[in-house]
Every structure is written in structure tokens, then in C-alpha cells.
Amino acid sequence: MSKVIGIDLGTTYSRVAVWHDSQVEVIPNSHSNRYTPSCVAYASTRQLVGDLALSQLEANPTNTITNVKRLLGRTLADPQTQRDSLKLPFALTGTLRPRIKVEYNDLSLTLAPEAVSAALLRDLRETAEAYLATCAKDVVISVPACFTPAQCHATLAAAHIAGLNVLQLISDSTATAFSLAQAASNQTALILDLGGGTLDVSLLRFGPPASFEVLATAGDSHLGGIDFDNCLLAHLIAQNSNDISQNTQAIQRLRIACERAKRTLSTATVATIEIDAIANNSNFNAQITRHKFEELCADLFAQIMDHVKAVVRASGIHRSKVDRIYVVGGSSHIPKLRQLVAGYFGNRPLTTLDNPEETVAIGAAIQAAYLSSGVSNKVQDTILSNAHPSSIASSHGSIKVSLNK
């Protein structure tokens, strides 16, 4: 029997989940990880996806594609695309829409971002099918609440190329709400979802039985964990005695080290970066303190808090009346972020979740089960009260997508 799956198509990491045996399972990939790097590489004669692709990032950066989600649905002339192109290890070309240049199978290819995303979606589908031992082509895919219609349609195009039948696109914040609906019954909740590349902030009112209403939402499709990495990267490049600004491989090695250092600083106050022979046979050594990291990223923290304040204002609910505060997503462990959010709400403790990175995938799987036939009453009790099943929420109202069940 075919299964309906939920996919969190992330900027840096993606996840696939399914409602199975009366509960949601986040499906492990062939490397036993419950997440897959959103990375596609072209190595000689093979296309690699996920963990295998990520292993190419240092040695083959110009043919290893990351952060492709930021290119979906955008024009090449878009100022944001132009800014992104300066930070990407691979080259962009094209006229109206950006195309990615790679060397593959002794050929020079230009790939649409949708084709690259399709490779990742196909891998996630195959992961689910191998785990479930059945077909899994029907899917609910989550997208940032602030995605434009063009970005939504680009996501649909990628899914079509991957052989998926999209039942619905839902916003990341709505997916998170589905995953929390039972626990937050009869309460108001602020959900801040900071992923690898995007930010979603929503204020919701949950009611019985596990229904909810989105009161206000805002976000930024270019504010996430990789922007924190970029702040640290720019600082270390400026501090390095050797100019590596034009050395793609050296920058990529340092970028990977910056992400690791950022993760270390979520639990430690100092991170050490050591890279052998980064350029011209010279080694790179640096220490970064949590305080310095927070100082470098001060503007990003301020932008995030501006979104939080805007959502609270737009909801019409005083912040003291917000019952629960959730900080989720892959970048949710950053201590300064959690401190600032808690401080804004009177230093009340944030609601702790076991796996805050998985809430979007879990919610997408719940909605997928709800849209399919023959699901249990437990799933059917979770009702989205503010959006038609063929729409996603955005800060500008509902974006209509013709994907009725």
C-alpha cells in the first residue's frame, strides 16, 4: 500500500517523515541519520546526493551545490541572487533565471535550481520507500512562510521532476504548529523557527481538540544558520595573514570549520579552528569565543528580534499573555538567540523539545496523513483553522496554489 510522506526541504539539511503505526517517524537515511544534507555534487561521472555529496565539498567545491533553496524562484538580476553569488563556490550563469555551471562526465552543464532540488527530493523519496518497502510518491512539502508564489511554483516544479505528487505546500510555521498542536492545547504560543537558511516566526492560538489559528506570521527567506557562518567566515578571512579571498577551496574549508565552530559555541565558550595547509602550505589556527561570535552576529540577532516583536504587535496579544515560547529549527541551539527570546518575554523559560530540528518534518507528515484517506481519528483531530488545504500562510496573506487533494 502506498504511503503519504512529509518532507522538510531545508536550505542546509532536509528530512522525510511518515505517519506509521499511529505515530510519526522521521525516517533515517542509508547512513542512519535522520537528516540528509541538502547537497548535490557532480564527481567525475557520478551525481552524488546528501552525505556523499557533502564529502565532496572541500575537494570539489565548484561542482558541489549547497544552499540551492535560496535560488529557487528568483531571477538572476535579483539583488539577493547577486549577493548570494558572491558567497557560492559554484558559478551562476543564465539570462532571466539563474543557472548553475558544473563539470560533469567531461561536459560543461548548466542546471536549473529546480533540477538540483529534484535530485534531493528524489533521494528523500527513495529513502522513504526503502524504509517503508512500498511506494511513497504522494507528499506534503513545507516551505518558508515568506516564500513568494514564484518560489512556491519552483518547489512544485522540482517535486514534479522528482516524480512526486504534491498534495499540498504548507508553511514551515504551520507544519511546526501541527507537530505541537496536542501539547499546546488551549494556549497561545510563539513559534520561532530558525533553520539553516530561513526564519519563520508565528503566534498561534491553540484550541481543543488540537485545532489552532495562526494570528500573525513573519519571516525572512535569507536569514538562517548559514548567515551566522558567513559572519564568522568574513571575520576570520580578514584576520588571516594570507589572503585567501580568491581561493575557492580554501574558503570552502574555512566555511566548513566555521559551521563546526558555531555548533561548538552552543555548548562551549571557546572554539578552536585548525586547518592544515589551507593555502600556500600555510596552516590556519584561530580561537573564537562565544562572546566574539555574538558580537559579530549582533545584526542578525537584532533582525530576528525585530520579526518577533512585529509578530507580537500584529497578533494583538500582549507578550505577557503568550503561554508558550518555542524556539525550533537547526539553529535553535544558539544560546544568545534563546536568551534574547526569553528576555523579551520576561525571562520566562522556553518550552523544551527533544528534537527541535524535526518539528517541521513531523508536522508535514501529520498533514500528509490528514490529507490521505483512512487515517486515524487522532490525526483527523488536528485541524488547520486559518488556511484552505491548497494554500500556505505568508506574511502577506494566503498564497493560493492549485493542489487540491
Image (spheres, rainbow, N blue to C red):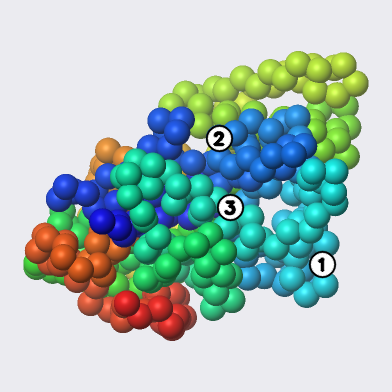
Label 3 crowding class (10 Å Cα cut-off): few <14, some 14-19, many 20+? Answer: many
Q: Earlier in the sequence, mark 1 or mark 3?
A: 1
Label 1 secondary element: loop
Q: Is residue 305 left or right of residue 110?
A: left
- Residue 39, given in percent of the width and then of the height, sits at 60, 44
Q: Quote the CA–CA distance across marks 3 and 2.
A: 13 Å
Q: How far across and down, in percent of the image, does residue 12 sit?
A: 55, 46
Q: Nearer the viewer, residue 105 or 210?
A: 105
Per the image, the residue denoted by label 1 is 94
| Local SS, label 3 | helix
The front one of 152 and 229 is 152
- Determine the CA span between mark 1 and mark 2: 28 Å
Secondary element under disc 2, as helix, strand or loop, is helix
Which residue is labeled 3 in the image?
119
Residue 256: % across, % down:
65, 32
Q: Tell me the residue at 43%/44% (across/down).
A: 127
Residue type at mark 2?
A: Asp
Residue 355 drawn above or below residue 11: above
In the rendered image, is residue 343 in sight? no
x 76%, y 62%: residue? 99
Residues tagged 1 and 2 counted as in contact (Cβ below 8 A): no
Q: Quadrant of residue 41?
A: top right
Question: What residue did someone put label 2 on?
Answer: 51
